[in-house]
Image: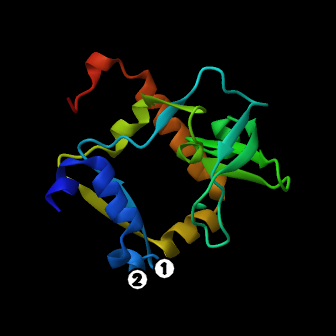
Amino acid sequence: SVEARHNFRAFDAWVTQSRDLDDLEELVSLVVFHPSFERWHALAPHVGVGSRVSSHYEEEDGERSRRSLPALLESLDPDEVGVRRVGVRFVDDGVQQWVPMEWLTPPAVTEDVLLDNEMHRAPHPTVHLIRRKDLAAVRDGEGGYRAVAALQARNSRFLRNLAVSDRPWE
């Protein structure tokens, strides 16, 4: 739609929730890029390890739960849980999960946009299709998930270290 072209949230919702794309889910992972990409927000200053938060959890099919539950924040270390992820332990059943930061609900997250969003900006709304069998090969390969997490952490650090005035994409 025209709105999705100009509005990141509308485009992101179309990609992540569209029944039109459901048939692709088993074959590919859909990665969103958009001129106004703003999915990742900073944690609130008072949130740290040991904080009680409300978080969505990962369902058996790997999807995000519809509702959030109380959880204790156990890790913020990107080398342990991955970039833009947090380790939580759910209060109701004690299950520990590493979830994307955007699965935490306010007031644990703020409206302050992380610089990492810049990596998913593109001149036009774009969806990258990554074959799931390729993702599985990376996970099962040498270093597996830790190698992917390390690369994401390195990219995130590199972006944070760039001076605002040195950003060539502006």
Q: Secondary structure at mark 1?
A: loop
Rendering quarter of residue 87: top right
How far is the residue under mark 1 from the one under mark 2? Answer: 7 Å
Q: Are marks 1 and 2 in contact (CB under 8 Å)?
A: yes
Residue 46 pos. (x, y %): 65, 21
Three-letter code for the amino acid on which mark 2 is drawn: Asp
Q: Residue furthest bottom?
A: 23
Q: Which mark is residue 23?
A: 2
Q: Which residue, given by chain and number where applicable, does mark 1 sit on? A: 26
User: Vertical placement of 85 versus 137: above or below?
Assistant: above
Residue 13 pos. (x, y %): 36, 59
Q: Left or right: 91 with respect to 134?
A: right
Three-letter code for the amino acid on which mark 1 is drawn: Glu
Q: Which mark is residue 61?
A: none
For disc 1, the neighbor class at 10 Å (few under 14, some 14 to 19, many from 20) is few
Residue at image point 66% right, 39% down: 79
